Image: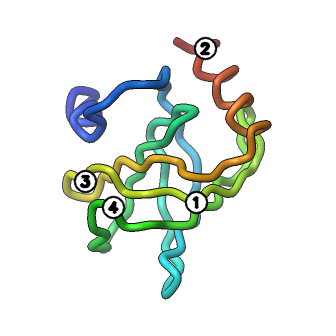
Amino acid sequence: SDSKDDEVFFRRRHLRAKYECHVLVHDRKKLFKAESFQISAGGAGLKIKDVTFEIEQQLYLHFRASDQVPAFNAVCRVVSKSGQKFGIRFLHVASITKDAISTFTNKVA
């Protein structure tokens, strides 16, 4: 269902790659478990069950470490949603993390 995943992202400013990772999501009230399915230096695609996040809602993420990208935290905003899939844009993420993500996405693209 890659075409379905692409629908979640309507703007492509950054090279994107398939990326599966455990993510903790916090909305200032509650902690949720999520899985990423795509990542870029500008944001990510997340699968989150049983939530009703709104477009433009600000979220706080913690990505677990993977072989490709070190663990990192990000402040982000929801930019799209389709069922349990959410497109999020990074608002604040360390530049060293952005570099690691860019290196990874350029390698697999």
Which residue is found at the position 27% from the left and 50% from the top? 80
Give me the C-alpha separation between circle 3 and circle 1: 17 Å
Query: Does 32 sit left or right of 64 as displayed?
Result: left
Marks 4 and 3, the one that precedes in the sequence: 4
- Residue drawn at (49%, 25%) of the image: 17
Alpha carbon separation for disc pair 2 and 4 = 28 Å
Element at label 1? strand
Sequence-first disc among 4 and 1: 4
Asked if residue 50 is positioned above or below residue 12 in the image, the reply reads below
Residue with the mark numbered 2: 106
The amino acid sitting under disc 2 is Asn
Query: Of discs 3 and 1, which sits in the foreground?
Result: 1
Earlier in the chain: of badge 2 and badge 4, it is 4
- Mark closer to the observer (2, 4): 4
Q: Which mark is residue 56?
A: 4
The answer to whether the residue labelled 4 contacts the one labelled 1, judged by CB atoms less than 8 Å apart, is: no
Dot placed on the residue nearer the N-terminal end, 3 or 2: 3
Per the rendering, the mark at residue 21 is none
